[in-house]
Image (tube, rainbow, N blue to C red):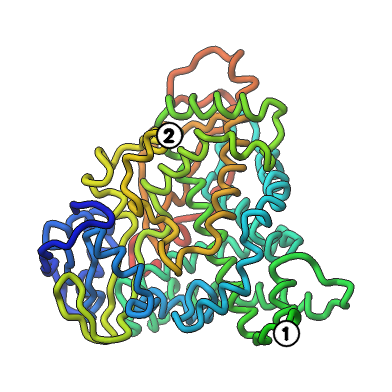
Amino acid sequence: MSGSVPGPARDWTVGTAPGIFPFIGHGIHLVRRPLAFLKSLPEHGDLVEIRLGPQPAWMTCHPDLVHQVLRDPRTFDKGGPLYDRLRMLLGDGVGTCRHHDHRRQRRLLQPEFRKARVADQVRLMGEEVESVCRAWRAGQAVDISATMLDLSTRVVSRVLFSDSLDTATAAELRRCLATVVRGMFVRTVMPVDALFRVPMPANRRYRHDSDRLRAIVDAVITQRRRGTSDDDRDDLLGTLLAATRGDGGGTAISHQEVHGQVLTLMFAGAESTALCLSSALELLGRHPEEERRLHREADAVLASGQPPGPDELPRLVRTRCVLTETLRHRPPGWLFTRVTTRETELAGHRLPQGATVMFSPYLLHHDPALFPDPDRFLPDRWLPGQAVAVPPGAVIPFGAGSRKCIGETLALTEATVAVAYIARHWRLRHLPGHTERLRPAASLGPRGLVMVSEPRTRRQADPPRRRGSLSPGTTVAPVVLNSRTAGGNDVRDA
């Protein structure tokens, strides 16, 4: 990739990716080595034709083309294999609905996601991160992936439903999410339904966990509906249920739409935030100098040891730099599809109505013309005075344009609270022999990540140890996300 965002008109190049397999197209490359395959595409053109199963799709490899697609949702609507699968699972919520219905849905939900409203939720975020970290012990091997998913599930369930889900239900929800996001990816890059109708264990597991995910949300909504008028709560589900009655003078929405919105927000809010947090902690563990800088800020801003509140959040500059660089380096939403609503032209190439167009924030974020040394983790890119060198629109972890993720502020606030509080109290060390292994699914990030927790207040008095060694008495916590649910690459495990 080359160029700036956005850039002047230029002569575009259009090509075709090599290595097409009969029947499955480039699906095998996207499953086995997805990130390497993405990075190989720009050498074949600014717009590159690939095959998802037998179906053609066009990958936008130049940032100007990405933004052309995102700025024109009427022509490049949410659709294609990814959103076709998501709609089967989630319905037509704010994240999956077609363009013509998006503005109405966004207006309904927007008040719950305004910055002032999110500030009111900082306290509950702090409560949940304290609760999660309270179980950690010195020298314990902590399943970071499962713990961060537990945290994000707790927070999103309180935002949606006021009360956290009970322990057993939350655990089942996490397991179902892990299965679904993994299976969703394989079904996106190889959209051949015959493969997934075969009654293999992985296919049965995907169908079962998809059904259970819907059933859990249905049960919560049904229970709330049975409550009295005095049971109305100031949460997002309350807003949606009020909308079914047409409260406030707006057009009443259907109960089916309530289910779709809750499922969409639960699906997106839990998984993506958890992967962002896991990636940040994994990267900090491999960059000790960045970790020390973060610790110094956490010690200065959170001197009391309490989670940050609204007054402390603006002072956590280094924390925000770490998170922004994490989202650049490893955007959880790393690959998306759109579908053309009419015949159109992109990069000088005519696309028919119904064509699948793809873009990748990961590919954009690793463009060396936009980010020198793009594979390095460098939070200093985002320090005041440094970030001005980054072209506008070069980082799109939450999308761009009118379809930008509605939960961006909520997710960033939750991640800031969690990373700052953890940095104030804990060091997290990789297990000996740790190697980075990203397993892209419908979202990108480490799965099955286990790290050793060391309390910072006691660590100062400990004798120095060789980096990578475990302390005596280290205990290994059970790993919740196993290879079958945490993103292996085999279609049989989809």
Residue 475 in view (yes/no): no
Query: Label 1's element?
Result: loop
Q: Considering only vertical position in the picture, is 91 above or below 38?
A: below
Category of crowding for the residue at label 2, using alpha-carbon neighbours closer than 10 angstroms: few (below 14), some (14–19), many (at least 20): some
Residue 428 in the image: state x and y as whole percent.
Answer: 52, 32
Q: Considering only vertical position in the picture, is 170 above or below 458?
A: below
Answer left or right for 267 relative to 127: left
- Residue at 70% across / 80% down in the picture? 243
Mark toward the start of the polypeptide (1 vs 2): 1
- Residue at 71% across / 34% down in the picture? 306
- Residue at 70% across / 52% down in the picture? 121
Answer left or right for 35 relative to 448: left
Q: Which mark, by number, is residue 383?
A: 2
Quadrant of the snapshot with the C terminus: bottom left
* Residue furthest out toward the front: 8
Name the residue that disc number 1 marks.
Answer: 246
Indicate the amino acid at tag 1: Gly
Q: Which mark, by number, is residue 55?
A: none
Question: Residue 240 is drawn in which quadrant?
Answer: bottom right
Query: Label 2's element?
Result: loop
| 1 and 2 marks in contact (CB < 8 Å) | no
Category of crowding for the residue at label 1, using alpha-carbon neighbours closer than 10 angstroms: few (below 14), some (14–19), many (at least 20): few
Q: Along the line of sight, which residue is nearer the eye, 328 or 311?
A: 311
